[in-house]
Amino acid sequence: MTACLDISNLSATLSNGQRVLRSVSLSVEPGEVRALVGESGAGKSMIGKAVLGVLPPSVKIVEGSIRLEGADLGALSAKERRRVIGAKTALIPQDPLTALNPSRRVGPQMTDRLVHILGWAADRADKRVRQLLDEVHIREPDRVMRAYPHELSGGMRQRVLIAAAFAAEPRLIVADEPTTALDVTVQKQILRLIAQLQKEHGTAILFVTHDLGVVAKISQKVTVLYAGKVVEEADTAALFADPQHAYTRALMAATPKYTDPLASLMPVDEAVLAGLAAEIAIADHDWRPSLDRKSGHG
Amino acid sequence: MILQRFLVRLLTMAVTLLGVSVVVFVIIRVAPGDPIAMMLPPGASQADIDRLRALYGLDRSIVEQYFIWLSGVLQGNFGTSISLRQDVMSLVLNRLPATLELATVALLIALLIGMPLAILGAREQGTAVEAGIDVANGAALSIPDFLWGLALILLFGVLWPVFEISGRVSPRLELPFVTQFYLFESILRLRLDLTKDLISHMFMPALALALPLAAIISQLLKLSLKEVMTLDYVTLARVKGFSETSVILREALKNAALPTLTLVGVQFTFLIGGTVIIERLFSYEGLGNMAIDAVINRDLPLIQGIVLVFALIFVLINLAVDMMYALLNPRLRHG
Ligand SMILES: Nc1ncnc2c1ncn2[C@@H]1O[C@H](COP(=O)(O)OP(=O)(O)O)[C@@H](O)[C@H]1O
Ligand SMILES: [Mg+2]
């Protein structure tokens, strides 16, 4: 069976030559949730953006490939890539406050992909979006769809964005820390909602988070990232039962229990970080990007 | 709440106009040059001079003169032009439409040049296309409108004479117009032959006025487009599959237009100020051209009338900008 998402040996650099992704490989099978966990700045969002073709102009892919259901994104023209990504993927963004256009009503922002990209009739798109609003427990679809974003609360907007993401039945959703910007009380509801919709729709999700508690709750597989490098990859249950890499163990020790938000965050053991830094320095020294792919896609 | 804001607004406008009228009134009277001396041939008797001074009220103190003038204005009487011996109000109203048409056409040209360049530059950011647009903007901005006027006269008037270089309309034409808005009326009457003649006269002065403004619109709108295009909702639109052009048009343009709009309002008032010299350069019979004659002749009532009308236009433009700002921004509309 072709993987829903298959990233292999992906390396990316900033314009000053600094590496942000180091030969990253990971895959997401159809219907599976893969968590991508690591500290802030590890490059998690970079991977998500690379998959969705929205890397900032300063970041170039120098090596490796990204396949969406077998289609190699790097081999497609920009227009083709946009079409494939638009048809197969969706994004649940990190910050619901900035992810909706402040000057457009919510309804058209939810239906526009269905109508303009997928070519649905307007009433079918409308019906579909209402159905999804119901699934995310929004009881007044008329009011919400007529509203401007600033008239809705943060949690409400994230529900809207989740509903919009699932509405087109994408094969893969990239969820980039979808609960981080929300109130603690709302975080759990939103997480439960995503898990529930994922099960019902059978959508594969690449779930980016820095929170191991969230990993445990939502994912079947997990990839641990440090400084743009995959340090461990495992079934979620296996990872928690028997973490293999020292960094993973340190991260676990540093993570307070998900149910205990007051527990203090411990710094990751310094010896572990020093070891990792040495490992990465050696890898960078040996690293030679193949010269036939100077400019990546993005 | 809204009514209160509106009243405050009206009051500010009135105070602004009053302030402008005081400043202009004093300056043109303190400045050297005697309007009466200009009216009479050399060697006129002192008695004649005094009689004329009294006729125009120039023998009174400045404060007295001002209040006489102001009470007239409040009754709709702007006085009589010294050099043209006609009612100031009707002189101004006769010329104003020509200037308004010129400024409107210039604004349209500026938008038609500036907006597409901004969109193109934002779409092609970081490429040679954007660099080329930046260079063109820099050039258009650093050359003032009257120099553009001279360059255009050389280009389209002399080297490749396709446009008229002087006047508002060809004198040989029979004009059926009942208003002074020749251009708008010719379009409404479907007299496209006249429209063509009017445009042919208006094109160069309007383009000269428009070029610096076009550069400002292009540069500023491009900057705010680029800024808006890094925002999350734009990223989301790209993920949805929208092309870069439709991302700009659907998501970015309206929000990026807000900061541009305010500045365009300010710059448009500069453009109207620029009509004074440009109308002179192209012998275009508008208010600006008349203003220069009025200053040369020390025609105090006419200068006051013209300046007050310009000030009123500036104030109204600011009001229009604020209203459009509120209209484009849903947060203000509901707040
Ligand atoms: N627009 C950008 N231009 C250049 N570098 C960036 C940009 N955004 C992020 N980075 C850098 O790339 C690295 C990875 O960032 P990111 O993927 O956002 O981390 P994470 O999502 O894991 O917190 C960081 O070192 C960050 O400083
Ligand atoms: Mg991130």
Image (spheres, grey):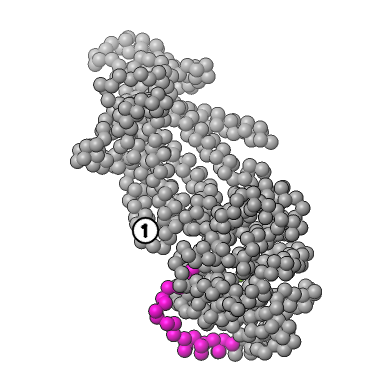
Q: Is residue A20 left or right of residue B87?
A: right
Assess disc 1: are there few (<14), some (14-19) or many (≥20) residues with their C-alpha within 10 Å of its C-alpha. some
Q: Is residue A213 left or right of residue B258?
A: right
Along the line of sight, which residue is nearer the eye, A73 or B333? A73
Where is the C terminus of chain B found, in terms of image quarters?
A: top right
Q: Under tag 1, what secondary structure?
A: helix
Write the residue at 36% across / 61% down: B128
Along the line of sight, which residue is nearer the eye, B5 or A132? A132
Write the residue at 67% across / 47% down: A146
Decide: is B14 above or below B251.
Answer: above
**Which contiguous range is marked in magenta?**
A276-298
Decide: is B38 above or below A166.
Answer: above
Residue at the front extreme of this rendering: A1
Quadrant containing ligand 2: bottom right
* Spot occupied by residue A160 in the image (x, y as percentages of width and height): 68, 57
Q: Quadrant of residue A161?
A: bottom right
Decide: is B9 above or below A96.
Answer: above
Magenta includes A277?
A: yes
| Res. A207 in view | no
Write the residue at 42% across / 73% down: A295
Q: Is residue B3 left or right of residue B44?
A: right
* Residue type (three-letter) at the residue carrying disc 1: Val
Decide: is A243 above or below A120.
Answer: below
Residue position for label 1 = B129
Q: Is residue A139 left or right of residue B1?
A: right
Q: Quadrant of residue A91?
A: bottom right
* Spot occupied by residue A72 in the image (x, y as percentages of width and height): 50, 74
Where is the N terminus of chain B found, in terms of image quarters?
A: top right
Q: How many marks?
A: 1
* Spot occupied by residue A18 in the image (x, y as percentages of width and height): 48, 78
| Res. A183 in view | yes
